[in-house]
Image: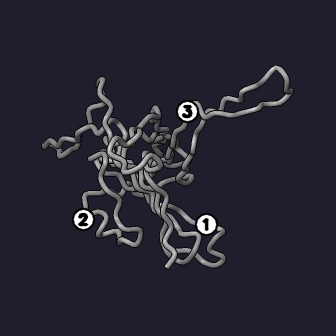
Amino acid sequence: MSTTPFDIVAGPATVYIHTTAGTAAPAVNASAGTITGDGWTALGLTEGGVKAKHTQSITQLMADQRSGPVKAIRAAEGLEISFALAELTLENFGLALNNATVSTSTGPARKILGLYQGLDVAQFALLVIGPSPYMDANSQYWVPVVVQTDSPEVDFVKDNKAVLQTTWTAIEDPNAASEDLRFGTLIAQTS
């Protein structure tokens, strides 16, 4: 986990996904076994970190009598979680490709992933668990409704591993208990 000073956060995060959008977040101190027991799937190893980007578009309003802006309004906002999957199982790949189904076949035994995604975009819940900035414990981003918005790409090269780059964008949760929870929460354990 973390070492002091805790407020200088360093270390990898683990990403979990749930195929049912709106699934409640587990407790911030839940064990990996408890999380996966509640239907969350760990996506495995990542490459290059897990990034949380709080996007926004700010419009600055001007007035004839002033040379600088007199007001700013937020025209749009969003939340994007992006990472590259290093464990390229067909099951992980299928989640990134609109929750595509992996089938099996025999003679020889194999798994098959259809690549066409169709018009509908699958919604998920997403959980990112990393170090707490307060103690040797967890923090977590919980996003109740996300969709995969990147154009997943894999490079197969002779001198490095293949990874699948993904970006998951928050969709406003229509069942949020309050307006500030529409994209979920960021929680850090303190004791």
Up the image or down, 10 lies above or below 175; here it is: below
At label 3, the amino acid type is Ala
Residue under pointer 2:
37
Whether residue 116 is visible, yes or no, is: no
Between discs 2 and 1, the one toward the N terminus: 1
Instruction: Work out whether residue 153 or residue 63 is closer to the camera in this orientation and state it.
Output: 63
Query: Which residue ends up furthest to the left in the rendered image?
Result: 106
Kindly report the distance in space between the C-alpha atoms of the residues bearing marks 3 and 2: 36 Å
Instruction: Work out whether residue 100 or residue 28 is closer to the camera in this orientation and state it.
Output: 28
Up the image or down, 25 lies above or below 62; here it is: below
Instruction: Work out whether residue 153 or residue 21 is closer to the camera in this orientation and state it.
Output: 21
Q: Tags 3 and 2 in contact by the CB under 8 Å rule?
A: no
**Could you classify mark 1 by the number of other residues whose Cα lies within 10 Å: few (under 14), some (14-19), or many (20 or more)?**
some
Chosen colour scheme: one colour
Q: Position of residue 73 (x, y in %)?
A: 64, 33
Name the disc covering residue 10, or none: 1
Kindly report the distance in space between the C-alpha atoms of the residues bearing marks 1 and 3: 30 Å
Kindly report the distance in space between the C-alpha atoms of the residues bearing marks 2 and 1: 27 Å
**Could you classify mark 3 by the number of other residues whose Cα lies within 10 Å: few (under 14), some (14-19), or many (20 or more)?**
few
Q: Position of residue 5 (x, y in %)?
A: 66, 76
Query: Which residue ends up furthest to the top in the rendered image?
Result: 64
Residue under pointer 3:
76
